[in-house]
Amino acid sequence: MSQSLAKDFNFHSLLKFAFPSIIMMIFMSLYSIVDGFFIAQYVDSMALSAANIVYPAVSILLAVGIMFGTGGSAVVAAKIGQEKQEEANRNFSALTLTTLIIGILGAVLGNLFCRQICSLLGATPVLMDYGTAYLRTILSFAPVCLLQALFQSFFVTAGRPGLGLSLTVSAGITNMLLDYLFVVPLHLGVAGAALATGLGQCIPAVAGILYFTFARKGLRFTRPEFSKGLLSTSCFNGSSEMVSNLSAAVVTYLFNMLMLKFEGEIGVAAITAILYGQFLFVALYLGYSIGVAPVFSFNYGSRNKQRLIRLYRISIRFVVVSSVIIALVAAFGSPVISAVFMQKGTYGFELTRHGGYLFSIAYLFCGTNIVASGIFTALSDGKTSALISFLRTFVFIVLSALLLPLVLGTNGVWLSIPVAEFLTLFISVPKLSRYFKDPKVATETQTSPN
């Protein structure tokens, strides 16, 4: 595994290495998108609104798995780079155990207080029954949800991104097939869509447990050891990714409340459709960040300055080209995305299509910010990573969402995220430029990992 991370990557080989993670993230985004499609097409738009109303609760829980996955993999990959394989295995085992326990607690507490959570998230009487049915089912799978998010990062660290890809693709296909079965022929409604998602997540979670249990070499399960600072360092390193998900929960709640105010329940359905599109497009950058993170971490741990600079330059090239392409696809594809979730000729369709045009501006800027945050996480600079993430996914969005609608109404809601992404560039770009300006900076401005 260390040999694959030690490779001298060029543009094409690095993209090839990150490709499985990119596909994994795309299929993970499809979990929610496919749910939304079947709910919108075979239940109704109010059910789609309800699924988005309760999404913040799911996002908060998922944040934990992603935090331990990205932050913990940075710690473990650095240990491997220092040729401390056994310590890396013990740390990985401890992180997995912690994630599992948190998942079990989330499932129990979520089911006990499901209706109260829905009410807290703003579910109206029209949406309450749909919301509780969806949330109660999806939270029952909290342990596997967290584990599959954790293993997503650690399959890459173990040098098996291809295995992670195949498992995630299998899970995605299973989710799609079960969505159709449960929602269309069996008429299980929103609960059926949530059940399909949970069963799909079982595939990478269970397979990950089996793989790391029976692996004979490389990264594998062993006796857990909570070495000093393991959890705190992992949480700190992964804080940007956790902040992104926690912020997404708050922002989704805020958007839901704003759209209820300006457009009613159909407005929530419209913003849901746009956010589903965002899940898909942003998955490219999230997958790339996850895929290249172990390479950055390994070279950081082995103090290879020149390769860190080379990896950075390749990443910038990738982001610039892909940002333009995605922005164009999102803009011209807005009617298509709208038609997936809304019936053509309705007010909901026109509202979603118009919002999609405005929202597509965000894709010109978000890739740089996401990849920048991921790079700093991989370099164990959790402080900078969290700063970028927090400003991008919370501070600037909340300010924009609170101020722009006062002047622009519903258009202000659509433009909140594009404005937030643009403002974040003034933080992420200087931080990256300063860090990688001199080859010495990559190792000398940071203390080496323990």
Image: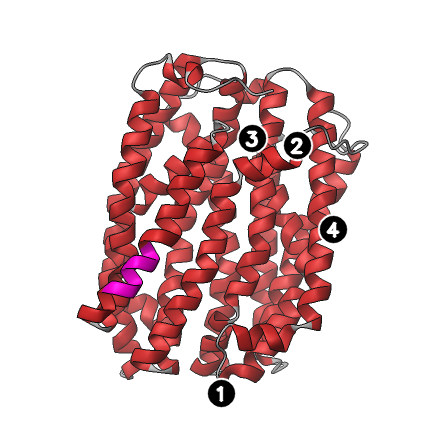
Residue 2 is situated, as x and y percent measured from the top left of the image, at 60, 20
Q: Which residue occupies 73% across, 37% down?
A: 94
Q: Amino acid at mark 2?
A: Leu
Label number found at residue 101: 4
- Secondary structure at badge 1 equals helix
Tell me whether circle 4 and circle 3 mark residues in contact (CB < 8 Å).
no
Residue 24 is situated, as x and y percent measured from the top left of the image, at 52, 46
Give the mark, 4 or 1, whose residue is nearer the N terminus.
4
Magenta region: 397-403
* Quadrant in the picture for residue 190: bottom right
Name the image quarter holding the C terminus.
top right
Real-space Cα separation, disc 4 to disc 3, in angstroms: 21 Å
Real-space Cα separation, disc 2 to disc 3, in angstroms: 11 Å
Residue 119 is situated, as x and y percent measured from the top left of the image, at 55, 78
The residue indicated by pointer 3 is 74
The residue indicated by pointer 2 is 230
Determine crowd level at label 3: few under 14, some 14-19, many 20+ residues with C-alpha closer than 10 A. many
Q: Amino acid at mark 4?
A: Ile
Determine crowd level at label 4: few under 14, some 14-19, many 20+ residues with C-alpha closer than 10 A. few
The residue indicated by pointer 1 is 126
